[in-house]
Image: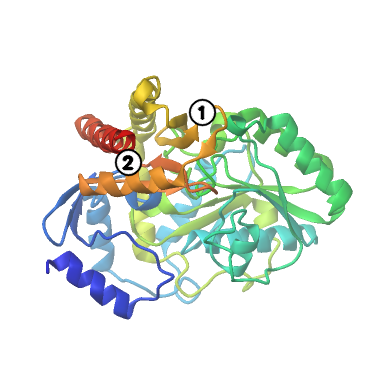
Amino acid sequence: MNATAQLADRQKSAVARGVATKSIYVARAQNAELWDVDGKRYIDFAAGIAVVNTGHCHPKVIAAVTEQVQSFTHTCFHVAPYESYVSLAERLNALTPGDFAKKTMLVTTGAEAVENAVKIARNATGRPAVIAFGGAFHGRTLLGMALTGKVVPYKKGFGPFPADVFHAPFPKTYHGVDTAEAIAGLKSLFLTDVDPARVAAIIVEPVQGEGGFYVAPFDFLREVRKVCDEHGILMIIDEIQTGIARTGKLFAAEHAGVAADIVTMAKGLAGGFPLSAVTGRAEIMDAAAPGGLGGTYGGSPIGVAAAHAVLDVVEAENLTGRAVEIGEIMRDHLTAMAKRNEFACIGDVRGLGAMTAFELVKDRATRAPDAALTSALIARAQDKGLILLSCGPDANVVRLLAPLTTPVAQVREGLAILEAALTELVTESQN
C-alpha cells in the first residue's frame, strides 16, 4: 500500500466524513506545481481555491512571514496592536474602488468577513433584512449558509437558518436569464417578500464562484447599485474569490466601474495564510461601538505580513496583466475545443481574467447538465497530473484557477492534459 492509500485510510478513520477532500496528499508545492507523498507531480489549476494567486511558496511571501515569525506570532490586536495591521488597513482603504473615506477591519476567514459585513450593515442602517442571489456562496456558518443560494452540499440538513435573508435571481446568460430579468426578480422581492425599507444590504459576487463561474454582466452590477441607492440599501460586494488580481483587475467590481459600500475579501489576500478583510465607507464601518467587532485571531500578524508581500508582488509582477494573459490562453484553447465535433459536450466557455470555466452538457440544444462527465473528467485529469475543481448547482461546471504566476508553458501543459482526458472519456463513451 502506497503512502496515499495509507493516508486515505487514516483520514477515513480520523476525519469527519463531511470534510470532503481529493485523494491528493501534498508533500510539497512550488508556484503552480504540487508533489504528493508518493512523489507524483501535478499542475495545479485550483490554487487552493483561488488562494495562492501568487503561487505556492512565493519567495517574497515566505520571506515576509519568516521575518514576522522571528518578531512575534500573536498578541491579539485588541490587546497589543501592531503597525502592520494599521498599514494594511491603509493600503486596502486606498486600493478598493470608491473615491471616499474608508476604514477596514481584519479577520480570519471569508465567512467571518461576510458575517461582519452583514453585522456592520445592519448596525449602520438599523435594518434587519439582507438580499443575496441564487447560486451564491458566502460561507458555511449559519448566516453564511442562509446567504448561500446552493442547497447541496452546503445547506442540506443544516437548518433552520437565520431569518430575514432573501434570494433574487442571478443573471445566467447561458441559461436565458439576462440583466433585465434578474433585476425584475430583485424588484419583485420588494412586492412579494420584503419591504425595501427593511433591507440593510444586498450582497453580490461579481463572478459567482461555487455557483458556476457565471460572470455578472457589468450593467447588472450597475443596476444593483442603482436599486441600493434608490432605497437606502448598502451594497456589499463579495470579492473573496474574485479579488486580488484574479479577474484582471485588483477587484472584479472595477470592470463595471461600481464602488460598493462594503467589500469583503479573503482567499488571495494573504497567499495561503488565514486572513480576511472588510473594507467600507468610513461612516458605515464606524457604526459599531468599540468591542462590537473583532476576534482573538483577527488580523494575525503572520497573515498581515503575508498580505503586504502579496500586494507588493501583485504590483511588481503585474499579476493583473498576467491574469488577463492566462485567461485568454485558457478560453481560446477551450473555445477551439468546443468548435470540434467530438467536443459537443462543451456547452459554454466563460470567465473573467484568470477565472475561467466551461460547462459540460449532455445536449447543446437542451443544455441538460452532465454531472457524470464532469466528475469523470476531473478524476481522469487528476490521474494524468492536473488538479481541477467543479462547481455549479448541477455540478457540471469545470473551473480553472491557476496561480497568476504560472509559466505559460505550464498553462499550456495543463490544458493539453485536460484535452487528452476529455478526449479519452468521449471516445470511451462512443465505444
Numbered tag placed on residue 413 in the rendering: none
Image position of 400 (left or right of 211): left
Q: Residue at the location (21% across, 33% down)? A: 413
What's the mark number on residue 364? 1
Position in image of residue 427 (x %, y %): 28, 33
- Quadrant location, the C terminus: top left
Quarter of the image that includes the N terminus: bottom left
Residue nearer the viewer, 351 or 316 = 351
- Which residue does the image show at 22% across and 49% down from the upper left? 383
Disc 2, SS: loop
* N-terminal-most mark, 1 or 2: 1
Separation of marks 1 and 2 at Cα, in angstroms? 27 Å
Residue 90 location, x and y as percent? 50, 50
Q: Nearer the viewer, mark 1 or mark 2?
A: 1
Q: Secondary structure at mark 1?
A: loop
| Front position in the image: 110 or 288 | 110
Judged from this view, the residue extending furthest toward the front is 431
Depth check: 118 or 19 in front? 19
Query: Observer-nearest residue: 87 or 42?
Result: 42
Residue 60 can be seen, yes or no: yes
Residue type at tag 2: Ala
Image quadrant where residue 340 sits: top left
Label 1 close to label 2 by CB (< 8 Å) = no
Q: Where residue 48 sits: x, y (%)?
A: 34, 53
- Displayed quadrant of residue 419: top left
Going by the image, does 258 lie left or right of 3?
Answer: right
381 displayed left or right of 81: left
Label 1 CA crowd tier, 10 Å (few <14, some 14–19, many 20+): some
The residue identified by callout 2 is 402
The percent position of residue 348, horizontal first and vertical second, equals 48, 30
Three-letter residue code for mark 1: Arg
